[in-house]
Amino acid sequence: MEQIPNIQELSIVLTVPNHNPTLLTPDFLAGSGIIPTDWELSRPPVLSARASQVAFTSGTNIVAQPGTITFSETLNHKDSDEVQVAAIAKKYAKTLPNLDYQAIGINPKRFITFENEPDGGRNYITKTLFAPGSWQDVGTEPLQASINLVYTLEHRQLRLTIGEAKLKLPDKDSVSAILFAGNFHYTVTGETAEERIKHLQEQLDNWQSDLEAFQEIIDTKFLSQPKSETILSIRDAV
């Protein structure tokens, strides 16, 4: 399969039932030391009680909704020591220590794009991951499919969803792609606010090993294996 450079993102989701989205403003982030004061906005912020969003030219995006705060960062061509999203999430929680933090999602995402293959994403799923069968030939349009997998790793689980996508890239038409979306879930525990913040900070330190595990599975188990080794039967995939 012919590929052009892939796109990667890391997001960290904090589950916080009592967080008010109106707290998230550029002034609060810079004034509290959560982000560097010289960071520039990539577009005007969205600020409301239903959802607030602040995006920066650094590639970092923060979204607050009732019950969750999501910190995301594009990772293309970045070394691990350049990735800042986990440190920003840590600073945010440390600045607001009395919120009811309940869980953390460390969610790596990766798009593999196919140039000059309009159906490359669909074909990868239906012809590489699935064994051919008449079940694919039902209906008036080509089959669309996604796969949900759960890997039990050391001390945690990776939930991995694989699906086809279309991406609009700069200076290019929409291209077919495969999306690998991962989720590592951690529950925040502790009797006091101080204990919960400490545990949250410790769990956030898993981001690098989680990202590396995700990337290794994608690279060695899906992208580098011969077709005969990656085909799944429909029974294995459901």
Image: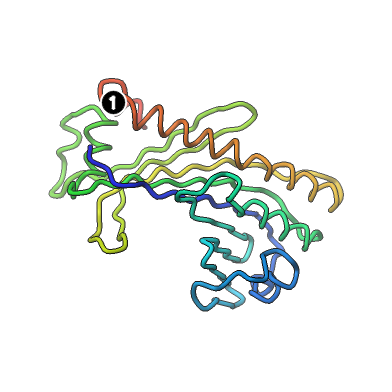
Q: Residue furthest top?
A: 229
Q: At 60% across and 35% down in the image, what residue appears?
A: 209
The residue under label 1 is: 231
Image: 211 above or below 87:
above
Q: Nearer the viewer, residue 31 or 141?
A: 31
Q: SS of the residue at dot 1?
A: loop
Name the quadrant of the C terminus.
top left
- Residue 180 image point, x, y percent: 41, 42
Amino acid found under the numbered disc labelled 1: Ile
Q: Would residue 67 appear left or right of 91 to someone viewing this image?
A: left
Q: Would residue 28 appear left or right of 182 to someone viewing this image?
A: right
**Coloring scheme used:** rainbow
- Residue 32 image point, x, y percent: 75, 69
- Residue 132 image point, x, y percent: 19, 29
* Crowd rating for badge 1 (residues with CA inside 10 Å; few <14, some 14–19, many 20+): many
Q: Nearer the viewer, residue 32 or 39?
A: 39
